[in-house]
Image (cartoon, rainbow, N blue to C red):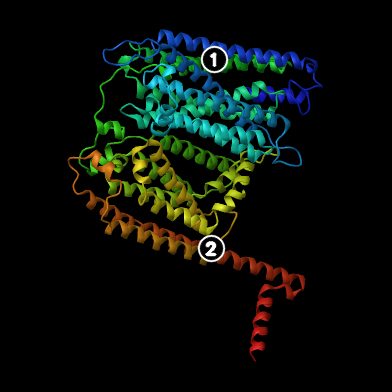
Amino acid sequence: MTASTETSQNTAATIPGGGAGSRGGPHGGTRGPRRGKRALAVAAAALAGLAVAVIALDLGGAVDVAALPGLSTADPAVTWAAGLLKYGYDLAMLAAVGCTIAAACFLPGRQGDRARLTGQSWRWLRVGAAASGLWAVLALASLPIDFANTFARPLGGVTAMGLWSYVGQYEQGQALGLTALLATAAAIVAARAFTIPGAVCAAALAVAAALPPVFTGHSASNGNHQIAVDGLLIHVVAAAFWAGGLFALFIARRDPFIAARRYSRAAVFAYAAIGFSGLIVFCANVNLTDLWTSSYGRIALAKLAVLAIGGVFGWAHRRSTLPAVAAGDRRAFTRLAAVELGLMAIAFGLASSLSVTPPPAEELPDPNTALLGFPTPGPISVASVALDWYPSVLFCTAALALVGAYIAGVVRLRRRGDTWPWYRTALWIAGWAAIVITTSSGLSKYGMVMFSAHMVQHMALNMLAPILLVLAAPVTLALRALKPDRSGGPREWLLAAVHSRWSRLVSRPLVALFIYLTSLYLMYFTGMFEWAMRSHFGHLFMTAHFLAAGSLFFWVVIGPDPKPRPLSYPAKVLLYFVSIVFHAIFGLTLMMGTNLIAEGWYTQIALPWMGDLLADQRAGGGIAWAFGEIPSLIIIGVLIAQWTRADEREGRRLDRMAERATASGHPEDDPHEVYNAYLAGLDQERR
């Protein structure tokens, strides 16, 4: 929404502190009719999407059932109900996510108490609470329908015991149950929150509730499900923010320029993420030969076309409405948003029909490919590790985005005349390069089938990459590059996060050490590791946790970025050596172990070229024991350098104090003289 800023600034210049709905404006007496028109526009957009969903379900063949000998026949009414309920589910989801994010981020807090919500943010949060509650109800209502659709039964044939088994044993049922639970939690938090931190918590719960079904749909069952699911995760979150954020602005009683400006900046990136991730999911699910020959491909093409038209139409329409806005027509934004909401509703209608439309029939992958998400790799070699890449969409996207943001911050400092050490930029790029290589090269494939290769991944993500990223000082760069915003912007949010209660808790040395070390023992000496290998969500969680735990620990030990709890250098050295001891014990335990970790997983993969699995596990223990030597040298060198510089800074500070004391004629203020007097007093006491 690139024009929203100009729209709101013109409005704010005319009506202080308000927008198109202010009582003092020329349209102040039409607030009621305008609310009615907006409600009608929302209803019209929803009905347009519903009509498209019905047409797509009918023409796409999702409700056509064929009777096969010896097999139960699906009920067309159940398929219709599944598609239409999914559409309502999606609308409730985008309203919940959009309104809670709007309450958390679009407006600053009240004057005099920045943590408390303004009236508009409070109203957004209450709408988000209602939408989250409706979302939870629809997720629960989807359980029996999804059960009947999955097992080709009539809705009347669903029993309580069968439904309970579905929720407890099947991924689809577990995902819907988890969504209902998280959406209910988001509704409760949003209904009871009156502060921005409460709104942030509600928004985090709402975003989390949108993710579980992603891991169980069509994208999670094809032969390259890792790429498809990663792309779909980005797609769902970006689409929920894009559509939900616009919905939140559309229903606002006023047109606050700060909210429109913040949404405008983020919506550009959200739309780019939608297009990029949509293409990835599209290519992962549909072969080029099936684009026009399959109903699934045609609906997917129609959805991409609607999204493209929405972007082009929005850009062109904003250009045409700018003169009207400048002339005082504050309804231009409302007209624009109404049309965009209609296009978004149509896109969601197509998406809901895709969820129940069978993808093109393809040859079933072999069992290992179905488990891994890629063909079984051959014997490990330097060439296969270096050249046989399988990109992790999430981590590659994060790397590109964060490296780009870091370089943009450095460029902003240079243009302003400030300096930034070149080696920190190199460290940041090297850290993300290590993450990309670890998660996307051939090493990521072999990490799924060989414990020793997995341990190389673990050590790189838990030690090497965090050290490089922490030493790059990204928080310091962001605080210097971002402009202060009196109304509270990204810089202020970052400062609040650094000094928050949560940050003070996790930055406690013993807490950071506990998180860093227990992740080793809990992951490998419980059943968590096998779960992480069998579940794509579990694998993403494991990878992200290793990276986050390592970054937290090394931020406390060597991080140059500001911390809520500074730690003395002797304490840092002691803390790090304690971690080395426990890390060595972990490696030795693996080297001497006689029980195979994740035995069911590795024996099911059963690579023909793989030798003794226990020997490979012991090799992984040796890697864990030896890998820390190079990072340890880096840490010790950095600590010595930081300690030396800190002593030099302290010495220069004391010298300046002594010079000021001499110049002012008050030698008693000289810290050197004070220290000498203290030593003389101690000597006199001994005598």
Which residue shows up at 27% across the image and 46% down it?
599
482 and 506: which is toward the camera: 506
| Label 1 element class | helix
Identified by mark 2, the residue type is Arg
Instruction: Look at the picture and state if 335 lies above or below 258.
Output: above
Residue 29 screen position, x and y as percent: 80, 16
Which dot marks residue 343?
1
Which residue shows up at 30% across the image and 15% down it?
289
> In which image quadrant can residue 565 be found?
bottom right
248 and 214: which is toward the camera: 214
> In which image quadrant can residue 256 be found?
top right
Residue 443 screen position, x and y as percent: 30, 42
178 and 264: which is toward the camera: 178
Q: CA distance from mark 2 to mark 1?
A: 59 Å
252 and 175: which is toward the camera: 175
Instruction: Look at the picture and state if 255 lies above or below 371.
Output: above
Residue at the spot of label 2: 645
The quarter of the picture where the C terminus appears is bottom right
Sequence-wise, the earlier of marks 2 and 1 is 1
